Amino acid sequence: MDNDHLPDDYRSRHYPVKENMRFQLFAWRMQNLGFVLLFIFIAAACLGLFSQGVLSNASAQSAGGNMILGYDRFARNSTETHFIIRIKINKENQLTAVLRGDILDNYDIEFIQPTPDVSIINDNALTLTQPIAKKDGWHSIYVTLKPNKMGYFTNTIALSDNEKITFNQLVYP
């Protein structure tokens, strides 16, 4: 490195300590880059990139508009995640929702509210059935799950009238 055109502070020295200023400048740049990356990482975590938050909150609606799902796009392994299923009942006297996909293999079901009268597991699907007292209104099902594996999972929630929502969730370690 040519030291003639540099200010004194940026010239390599040999006395009292041998310094390589080219390497020192590189180290300072890497330190600044590290600060920027750390700030971006913390901001992303605060916004919900790694679990609950603005970036993680998602909702999906069925094609017929009779079912709306609220869920988190990102979850953490062994940490609770919540699904809120809102269903509009028009004709039937009972509500039947079927959860398919990776839910039974990769999640532990912690809580379902309201508690269904009948719940059946068959063909890798969980069927929840409960009577409905009031027709022509929206009903909600709150499901709390705990992922027991990490990965990218595809799940489907379907109604008895063939309306369905397919959604994905990324589970971090």
Image: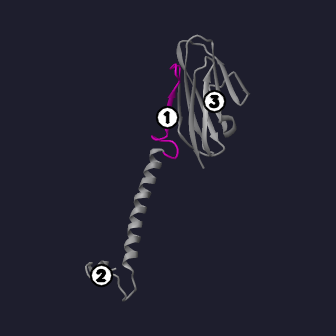
> In the rendering, which numbered label is found on residue 3?
2
Which labelled disc corresponds to residue 58?
1
Mark 2: few/some/many CA within 10 Å (<14, 14-19, 20+): few
Task: Farthest residue to the bottom: give it.
Answer: 15
Per the rendered image, the range of residues in magenta is: 49-67
Q: What secondary structure is the stretch in magenta mostly built from?
A: loop
At horizontal 39% and vertical 82% (from top left) the residue drawn is: 19
Could you give the CA–CA distance between mark 3 and mark 1, rounded to whole angstroms? Answer: 20 Å
Q: Are marks 2 and 1 in contact (CB under 8 Å)?
A: no
Q: CA distance from mark 2 to mark 1?
A: 57 Å
Judged from the image, the secondary structure of the residue bearing numbered disc 2 is loop
Pick out the residue farthest to the front.
2
Say left or right for 122 vs 65.
right
Where residue 69 appears, as percent x and y from the top left, is 53, 28
Select label 3 or label 1 by which is in front.
1
Return the x and y of residue 6 as percentages of the image width and height: 27, 78
Number of callouts in the render? 3
Q: Amino acid at mark 1?
A: Ala
Amino acid at pointer 3: Ile
Residue at x 62% of width, y 37% of height: 145
Q: Is residue 90 magenta?
A: no
Assign a secondary structure to mark 1.
strand
Question: Per the image, is 51 magenta?
Answer: yes
Residue 61 shown left or right of residue 32 in the figure: right
In percent of width and height, residue 85 lies at: 56, 27
Q: Position of residue 106 (x, y in %)?
A: 67, 40
Label number found at residue 112? 3
Q: Nearer the viewer, mark 2 or mark 1?
A: 2
Secondary structure under tag 3 reads: strand
The N terminus appears in which quarter of the rendering? bottom left
Residue that sits furthest to the top in the current view: 91
Q: Amino acid at mark 2?
A: Asn
